Image: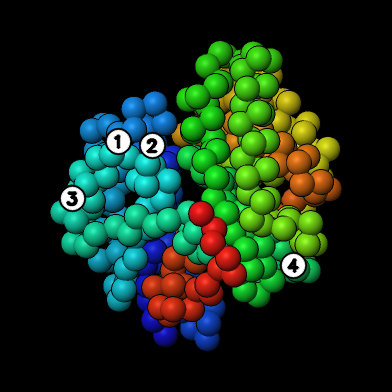
Amino acid sequence: MTRVAGIDCGTNSIRLLVADLDGGGLTDVVRTMEIVRLGEGVDRTGRLSPAAIDRTRIALEGYAETIAETGAERVRMVATSASRDASNAGDFRAMVRAVLGQDPEVITGDEEARLSFTGAVRGLPVEGPYVVVDIGGGSTEFVLGTSTVEAARSVDVGCVRLTERHLHSDPPTAAEIAAAEADIRAAVALATETVPVAEARTLVGLAGSVTTVTALALELPAYDSTRIHHARISRDRVAEVTAMLLGATRAERAGLPVVHPGRVDVIGAGALVLRVLMDEIGAASVVASEHDILDGIALSVASPGRIPPVGQDAR
């Protein structure tokens, strides 16, 4: 048995998984998340702000303590969309090196897609081929495959990026929503040039926007990952939840018990990405997964080289 730690630092959140690998499966020891909004303002300025880097540092210091306390033997930290886009990513890397004693891996959208797929399909009770969509803060990954990745594409639409770019009113105006929808449709068209989504039997949705929409669709009184994991939600129900979120004020969204405080201002955009991409690819339903890139990172650090190559260029 090997104890490993994976850290996923995205545009909106930073997450830690400490897990034991035994017989090819992962057993969670610690799984936790902090909303740090590392990518705040990156779409506009092209830079990571000092405040965002400092918020991330504080969370990472806590993670480093947890890793030491739990005795993880190997650690892999992956940084995704915001760190790819920022001109001052070197400041972020220096901070991570000082706290964690190693550099983060600022991975490509291609690698992000592969890791997300590997984490998501583990234990799926539904039939493939799957198209896995990982809706992040700055980007969304589309991945097609069954047991291995066959095609993948990362596109630059995510809940933070779209909110900062378009959804400025409270609640957003019809014109703002239409502008965001146009960006999403263009991104989906770009993704489907590479990823033949029509070959998939099941759409699998990952990350906080999808799991939060699922919790709302299920009308859960509190966030319950055991009920959300592998729940199937219809396209009509996703559309209803999206309309509710986009029609609500920030205060009204903050009053929803399943919405994390750090997602209140961006959940409408995240839901919109899911609703529009389901419309565009003709998906009747989506299966939510609580296993995602974080699980893929842990698996990859436990067994380097197990992540399959993409069948064609994903970027």
The residue that disc 3 covers is 94
Compared to 282, does 106 lie above or below? below
Q: Which residue is drawn at 68% across and 35% down?
A: 185
Q: Residue at x 37, y 32 (%)?
A: 42
Q: Determine which quarter of the picture holds residue 20.
A: bottom left
Can residue 54 be seen here? The reply is yes
Please name the amino acid that badge 3 sits on. Ala
The residue that disc 4 covers is 129
Separation of disc 2 and disc 4 at Cα?
A: 33 Å
Q: Tell me which numbered mark, 3 or 1, is placed earlier along the sequence.
A: 1
Please name the amino acid that badge 2 sits on. Gly
**Cβ atoms under marks 1 and 2 closer than 8 Å:** yes
**Cβ atoms under marks 3 and 1 closer than 8 Å:** no
Residue 61: horizontal and vertical position, in percent? Answer: 24, 51
Q: Tell me which numbered mark, 1 or 4, is placed earlier along the sequence.
A: 1
Residue 94: horizontal and vertical position, in percent? Answer: 18, 50
Q: Tell me which numbered mark, 3 or 2, is placed earlier along the sequence.
A: 2
Can residue 58 be seen here? The reply is no
In this view, the residue in front, 226 or 151, is: 151
The local secondary structure at tag 4 comes to loop
The local secondary structure at tag 1 comes to loop
Please name the amino acid that badge 4 sits on. Pro
Q: Tell me which numbered mark, 3 or 4, is placed earlier along the sequence.
A: 3
How has the structure been colored for display? rainbow
The local secondary structure at tag 3 comes to helix
The residue that disc 1 covers is 48
In this view, the residue in front, 237 or 81, is: 81
**Cβ atoms under marks 3 and 4 closer than 8 Å:** no
Q: Tell me which numbered mark, 2 or 4, is placed earlier along the sequence.
A: 2
Separation of disc 3 and disc 1 at Cα?
A: 13 Å
User: Label for residue 39?
Assistant: 2
